[in-house]
Amino acid sequence: MAADNSVLLGLVEEFVSGQVDSKATDTAKGIKTGQFTILQLVEALGLSLTSSQHQTRGRGVQLLSLVLQECYSCLSEREVEVLLAFYENRLKDHYVITPHVLRGLKALTKCSVLPPGSAVSILRSIFQDVHVQSLMLAERSCVYNILISLMESREEELKGLGADFTFGFVQSVDGERDPRNLLLAFQVARNIIHRGYDLGKFVEELFEVTSCYFPIDFSPPPNDPHGITQEDLILSLRAVLTGTSRFAEFLLPLIIEKLDSDVQSAKVDSLQTLAACGLTYTHKELAEFLPGLWSSIRREVFQTASERVESAGLSALSALTSCLSRSVLSSDSEDYLQVFLNLVLKDCQHHLCEPDLKLVWPSAKLLQAAAGASYRASLIVSAAVIPALLEQYNNRTQCAQRRTLLEVLQGFVQPTPLSRPADGEESVLVAFQQSLCSVVFSALAESSAGLQVTATRVLTALGQQPGLLAQTDVEKAVDHLTRLILEEGDTQVSLAVVECSGSLAHLHPKAFISRMIPRLKEEILSESNAAVRQRCVTAVASVSSQLSVVQESAPVLLQVLASAHTGSCSFSMEEVTAACISLQRIAAHAHDAEEIGQFFHDNIIPRLLGLALQAALQSRDSGHSPLTDEAVLSALVPVISTACAALQSGSASRMAAQAVSLFLDGDVSFLPENAFPSQIQLLQSQAESRGPSQLVCLLMACVCSLPRSVDIPEIDTLLVQLEDLSCTCSHLFSYTFAAKCFAGLVNKRPAGEALDAVLERVLKRISVELDNVSSSQRTQAFTLLLWVAKAALLRYHPLSTALTDKLFALLSDPELGSQAADGFCVLMSDSPDVLNRSCHADVRIMYRQRFFAENSTKLVKGFNSAEQEKKSCYLKALSHIVNNLPREVQLTELPALLPLLLEALSCPDQAVQLSTLSCLQPVLLEPPAALRNQLEALFSRLLALATSPAMKVRIASLRCVHALSRLPEHMVLPFRARVLKALAAPLDDTKRLVRKEAVAARGEWFLLGSPGGR
């Protein structure tokens, strides 16, 4: 024991007299291990704490405080009590000791065994004996943290102080300027307000001591390690100022005063604070200041050129209106909402009668913001404004004026979440139903495209609200929309009409079934203008979101395909493809409506398969059908895959069985009009380019988009035949889709010996074909390798490494090198028709990052060891891999690959150049150190590419040159003259987009180093 005391005395002596700060850590360690106690430490510090030298006393208290910061959780209640008494007494000591005392108190306030009443005692001592604002930053922070800690653990004790606590805090914080401490002080003030502390007669004092910072004007220094932003301070202060309605009499006049500021950020902060007041204040606090507040908001919205100020002003108006709407009306009280809205209407309503003047829109926005704040407000504003707007519309004859009035009207017709009627309440627009419909139909009949577009938006808004469109109005609307689809060629009008039709058809399907679909069908199947038929096909898809409509519309599109096949109507290839795209849009609704998916399973998919089979057999035996065209078949794939991906398990299993039986056994029993030959071999390689084998794309669409839980029947036989087709067929379309189908099935197959055997077998076959340089089927084997590698890579299969290594080896192949390089784009990018998440493929997260991490070294080694003529393939592969990585990964990994990327810029392949430039541009905004050593090479290559034959390469290189101007001036200034000279040529480029980038880049470089530059 004596030895421990001597050790402790030695530690104290070295810390106090020897100024060895590390001994505090050793002392704390001894207390934690039980070698000695905190009271023994106090005894050992006796001479130091009673020394006549305040520096010695300070070192003694400092040691004790440092130890307490480490050991406060080990203290007993009695020890805490003794230490508190000591520290409170030390607050009266010399000022150099105060910082150490505060740190000790801060540690003690964290103790879970803090004695009852000690919180009050600590705060009384601090408030009486410490002038907080004369302390240094860190010590002031200690005081605020002590307050926060005690408010968390001893709230009831502190509330017992009454208003004295608030007064003490006001004195402590008055004059604080450091942003870090202000955040803490605002937190204390927020706790005082929100947790019900007694403010007593110090309400105004608490407001004054916090509002003096309003509005916040703070710009953090560059590279601020504390990360404090202006927004943090604004939100913290706002929570204080708007936390209690007792501040209203002081805050509202302050807001009105600050809105006279010329500083935009002050205006925005003031308006946002006013909006926040609306959540906590009542009409009583607002009543006195409503005229002044309205005057300030109106001035800001009418006069500002800033969208931020305007938006904040409208939000503030909406918040005030919403607050007043919550007031409870009584017979002897004034309706403050009515009074306030009368002010708004008085100043704004008359401007709506002047559609040619600039104040019409600010006035409309103000009225719309007020109306959208509550249902009661919308009743008052709509009753005053809508009749006037309708009258103005009917009195005006110019289309521009009518359009403005209709656009204003649209804002009042479209309800906000706050102004929607509750259950049992009717829409505020019911009284104007007939007049509104009359105006909309009148506008739809006009020849002005702008007026028609606005009218469709108003019609959409009316249709989405119950009770505003009677059945006769709906039918009339459908007739107008149909007429516009058939007659109006303007692109904007067509898009607006199609969008409006889709919205209304979802709510009123019967009217569209009876009035629009038949007319569109008649037009589609007629010999009319191709553009009109295209609009009709698009419209058919847009209105088909309900099963009842789909049952009428989908057969129309099927009839287009059938007519194109039989030749009964002269549809172009583009029209047939457009019909497929529309069918795919309809099928997309199956994700939300199970019955639509079932309808496609029962009717549409069998019909599509039947038509495609008829066309394939007919082209083999007699003549050509559009349905055998690769573009059409490719368009049919997403139709079937989208529908199959949404099927429920039972239907999905039946779909798998039907598709497999069709392609393996020639079973056509489920196809309509199945007058097909008895022996159909769809998966056998065809000598001719067109034939049944290309229908393998439809097999892929059927079976590779089904959920992973669905078992594919006869999958082993199917995989063998797909493997044979992909390796032996000479038709590019057929063997590519056979490889895709094979890969899609492999990707979803459960892990195990069966899957491993399939992959090993196909890898062996691929290797044999690729190793045989004289083989005529090397390209087919490569295609299969590529897609199987992607299937394995996506699911992290162990054999994926062997497959991708095979691809890397092919980069030096004289015949397949370029294809192998392009194959890495397939490997890393998302495939639209197979092996994607929408098709339920097994896609693991971050597979791209994992592939890059495992293979980037191989790529670099391969490049370094490759012959000069083969290096371009490695560069192309690298470019594809890096370009498909997430930007965050690119920024961290590119410095190591920079030499290769610079080499890639010299590659003659324009695709490699463009891909590399797109990788470099984001990196140049925050260049790594490695890049700064390569500036000479980088500038040489970028400036050479600024005159590339490819426009996209020229644009991308100019953007990179522009980005380089943001580097530190001393690094890029030596290149200024050279860059300006090189950028002269792109200024005269034949393409406007190139000239635009050249102007932007040259402007930055011209200002570089100039007095007016950055």
Image (tube, helix red, strand yellow):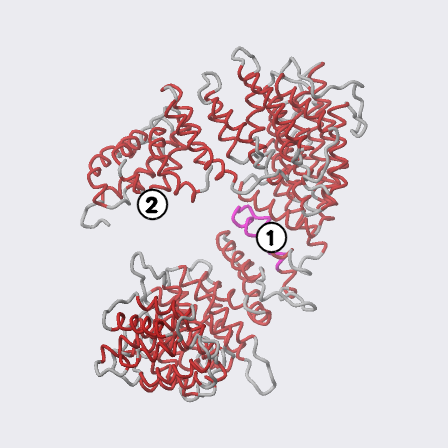
Residue at 60% over, 19% down: 765
Are there few (<14), some (14-19), or many (20+) residues within 10 Å of tag 2? some
Tell me, yes or no, if residue 823 can be seen here.
yes
Location of residue 19 in the rendering, given as x and y in whole percent from the top left corner: 24, 69
Location of residue 592 in the rendering, given as x and y in whole percent from the top left corner: 68, 47
Are there few (<14), some (14-19), or many (20+) residues within 10 Å of tag 1? some
In depth, the one of 596 and 62 nearer the eye is 62
What's under tag 1, amino acid-wise?
A: Ser
| Circle 1 residue | 442
In depth, the one of 235 and 330 nearer the eye is 235
Residue at far left of view: 1011
Q: Is residue 376 magenta?
A: no
Q: Secondary structure at mark 1?
A: helix
Location of residue 860 in the rendering, given as x and y in whole percent from the top left corner: 39, 29
Location of residue 347 in the rendering, given as x and y in whole percent from the top left corner: 45, 71
Q: Secondary structure at mark 2?
A: loop
When asked about the image quadrant of residue 359, the answer is: bottom left
Sequence order check: which comes first, mark 1 or mark 2? 1
Q: In the rendered view of the protein, which quadrant contains the N terminus?
A: bottom left
Vertical placement of residue 891 versus 353, above or below: above
The number of numbered discs placed on residues in the rendered structure image is 2
Q: Is residue 437 magenta?
A: yes
| Circle 2 residue | 926
**Viewed as shown, does residue 777 lie left or right of 349?**
right
When asked about the image quadrant of residue 956, the answer is: top left
What's under tag 2, amino acid-wise?
A: Glu
| Residue range highlighted in magenta | 436-455
Are dots 1 and 2 in contact, CB under 8 Å? no
Tell me, yes or no, if residue 241 can be seen here.
no
